[in-house]
Image (cartoon, coloured by chain):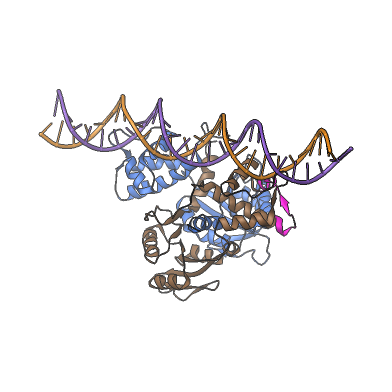
Chain colours: A blue, B brown, C purple, D orange
Amino acid sequence: MSKKFKIPSATIGRLSMYSRYLKDADNKGIVTVSSRNIAEATGVTPAQVRKDLAYFGEFGTRGVGYNSRELYNYIMKILGLDRSWPVAVIGAGNLGRALCHYKGFAERGFNICCVFDNDPNKIGEKFADVEVFPMSALEEKVKVHNIKLGIIAVPASSAQEAADNMIKARINGIINFAPINVIVNENILLRRVDLAAQLEYLTYSLEDN
Amino acid sequence: MSKKFKIPSATIGRLSMYSRYLKDADNKGIVTVSSRNIAEATGVTPAQVRKDLAYFGEFGTRGVGYNSRELYNYIMKILGLDRSWPVAVIGAGNLGRALCHYKGFAERGFNICCVFDNDPNKIGEKFADVEVFPMSALEEKVKVHNIKLGIIAVPASSAQEAADNMIKARINGIINFAPINVIVNENILLRRVDLAAQLEYLTYSLEDN
DNA sequence: ATAACTTTGTGATAATAATCTCTAATTCTA
DNA sequence: TAGAATTAGAGATTATTATCACAAAGTTAT
């Protein structure tokens, strides 16, 4: 069920950054890049880049570096981004709407294909071509589109219910934007993204000095 | 300039979670909570809760626990949230618009007071009472509202420029939503939030199994 | 061909963070 | 009041993650 080796979650985040740089380099016609080039572009150390890549194999040539396009393809494969992923959004509020309009997902192969909400006034609305369906339609849509990923974009008070519904519909990877700890079975992947908390890292550091 | 002790950044994120639970508990009339209560509500271990708090002092009573409201107030003070923070958003696109409408910021004392964009068509528009100003107005608005925090909500290609402009205007805490590594002087606080990368943690784990 | 240089991959080391374990303070029960 | 139960705090331990340092492999210049 899980990977052979335990890979630091920070490594996965960095691979994502590396891949963006590599795509950019390839687009600019840069054929080979060194761990130092990658490091400087992404704000880490060259040793960190090499160590991160070493978890997955040997992709470079000593004395030379890495082939931009090849390494890009390897990383995208590692991240599971060598294909498109349909995504369901729960919650047709401002956040749900924004996520539907956000171009950054499509660039990485994420295709938000439906939004779900209980508010009858919102059913049938369209956010950038993404239609709003009633929650009751979730299970069917998940089956039809083979959706594996879901995003919770509802208030904290209904986040657990949203998660439960998604799991019942057989979604097994969830991003939770609600500022509450949602409890799920251990075979479900869950990540919490707390937008306000991001600002709080800054205010903590700015406070008192 | 920086804190006496180096506190793990993960601790700050957890304090934010603890404070939300404590507020909730206090609202429900729960006077005392134990590290176990906090831990269960936030998905960490009791020892972790106590260790996190121990960085900042002794807030509890042995055999009893913590006073919900008092501990809430302590944590909010630690996070610098015992006051309101004006915030500038750079970029009046979908993301900028969504951030202006997002209720979760106000709940924690963040007040998005202006949005800035170079597109003349967007100047004067209003996102939930937040007016869009030209980039040239940034410096003046920062001064008038005493803005210390800014959010980059522009495409990757103009993220560095946005950061440079903010720094010139004397903003010193930045959240970057653009999927690119922005380079800033070390006395500027910067955090990157990559929404697509959040989904990639999931696809990485779902891939191949 | 040789020497100087570049760069990867990796084992060793250091730094950081989480967990464990125990003691001390407090409350509850009989 | 004595004993059992609860819980915070903190030092010690363990686990995790990042950095260092260097050998191996490749390139370039002469």
Q: Position of residue A134 (x, y in %)?
A: 67, 59
Could one spot residue B95 in this view of the protein? Answer: yes
Name above or below for residue A147 compared with residue B164: above
Q: Is residue B36 magenta?
A: yes
Q: Along the horizontal axis of the image, is B114 left or right of B23? A: left
Front-lying residue, A55 or A69: A55
Q: Which residues are magenta?
A: B25-41
Residue at 48% x, 71% y: name it.
B145
Front-lying residue, A82 or A91: A91
Q: Is residue B127 magenta?
A: no
Residue at 38% x, 72% y: name it.
B136
- Of all residues, the one furthest to the bottom in this rendering is B124
Front-lying residue, B83 or A59: B83
Name above or below for residue B81 compared with residue A174: below
Q: Position of residue B115 (x, y in %)?
A: 47, 69
Q: Along the horizontal axis of the image, is A40 left or right of B131? A: left
Name above or below for residue C4 compared with residue A26: above
Residue at 38% x, 32% y: name it.
A58
Number of residue marks: 0
Q: Quadrant of the N terminus of chain A?
A: top right
Q: Along the horizontal axis of the image, is A158 left or right of A10? A: right
